[in-house]
Amino acid sequence: MKTKKLFQWVRIILFSAVLIGGCVLGLILPLRPAVSETEGRELTEFPAFTWESFLSGDYTAQVSLWYADTFPGRDTLLGLSGDFKGLYGVGDRAFQGYGGEADTLDSDTDFIWDNDPPEEPSPEETEGESAPEETEPETGPASEVIDGYYVEGDACYQLYYYKADLVDRYCRVVVKTAVELNGLATVYDIVVPTSCCYGLTPERTAELGASDGLAVIERIYAAIDAYCPQAGAETPVVTLPVHEMLGAHYDEYIYYRTDHHWTGKGAYYTSRYFLDTVGRSYPALDAYETFTYDTFLGSLYRHTQNLNLKNNPDYVEAYLSPTVSELTIFRDGIYQPRPLIDTQVTSSNKYLAFSSGDHEYYETHNETITDGSAVLIIKESYGNAFIPMVADSYEHVYAVDYRFWNGDLRSFVEEKGIDTVLFLNNLMATADSYTVRCLEKLVD
């Protein structure tokens, strides 16, 4: 009897010691991380105290969130969690994330321009919306739209869910930009398909409740073509069906398996399609030196923590321009020089190698070209890998990330003497309320 009570007391003491030790560890501020390399985001900051937030309960709720979000050893624990799940056996297929609900892709092509679209998003649109996936750990919103993840073998796919209203609004932004720039510049539009458009069969896509991304791209281009004359665009938008060309190269390494971006090679092929269309020359592929980061686990791994992905990491290969090595970004209120291709990325997010990550403004100057040529790229993070691939073809390359940039578009185009404006967006951006509303600010 005494022995049984002794064991009970030993268990109580050990449990209490672990509990108290964990609490003490959690309260040691110097050990608390500020950034999660595993999740690729900044962690919750300790809240500023105000009596209003304290009395409302918001302050204590934020302290609790901070305590849980910045617990010492967080990344290690997340990694162990993924490894532990793997002990159950990693199957060939797994689905994780929000399944979403796709609208039916209408076959109707009778596109009618409406000069007075709804100003406010519907409740369904704002429910569950998200900000962009961060590609610079020290700035910007925490996440880009990723409605669902489907793991098959050693690859993860970001599923696409068609939203008719949002896609239509995307088309209208592009057309309104062409009208806004009447007489100044020609507008081009590229919607880049994501890997699910090629990596998943139509049957698997339908089974998962997702949408046919290639069919959506075709509809986008048809709508833009129909809207331009109705809206009064003097020069119609030039839509570039790169999805056909990229499909022919899908057996090459043009998309990452653990990250939602395309690779440097995917950006290379697309840049050549664009440059051929506008009639600009470019170096031969063998003129580029390449730089490689051997190991890269990207956003899709961070979200799923899938062991198949962890055991089969990506690599990042970048093409080094023979004529331009530096670009200028606007950050923290000042213009700063950065490498066009960063060969010293310390973060686990090696996609930061391209154009030094997400910033509101970029500019390159090619001193070997003196014809005054200038292009403006309106982009999200897919554009980061694209900028270096056109830097050899223009005297000036300008790019703005519309999620952060608040400039006046027409005034900027006039000031810089830009005659070519390119919308470069991945397919996901056309069906996300956050990115569409950011785009609309360009022409509002």
Image (spheres, rainbow, N blue to C red):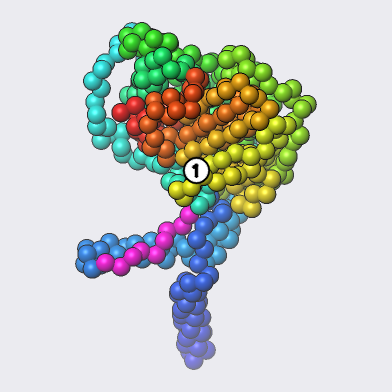
Q: Residue placed at 33% from the left, 10% from the top?
A: 232
Q: Residue placed at 67% from the left, 18% from the top?
A: 281
- Residue in front for this viewpoint, 335 or 150: 335
The residue that label 1 is drawn on is: 330
Magenta-highlighted residues: 41-50
State whether residue 64 is above or below residue 263: below
What amino acid does circle 1 point to? Phe
- In the image, 114: left or right of 43? left
- In the image, 293: left or right of 60? right
Crowd band around label 1 with a 10 angstrom C-alpha radius: few (<14), some (14–19), many (20+): some
x, y (%) of residue 32?
50, 67
Name the dominant secondary structure of the magenta segment: loop
The quadrant where residue 370 appears? top right
State the quadrant of the C terminus. Answer: top left
x, y (%) of residue 373?
57, 22
Q: Residue placed at 61% from the left, 52% from the top?
A: 347
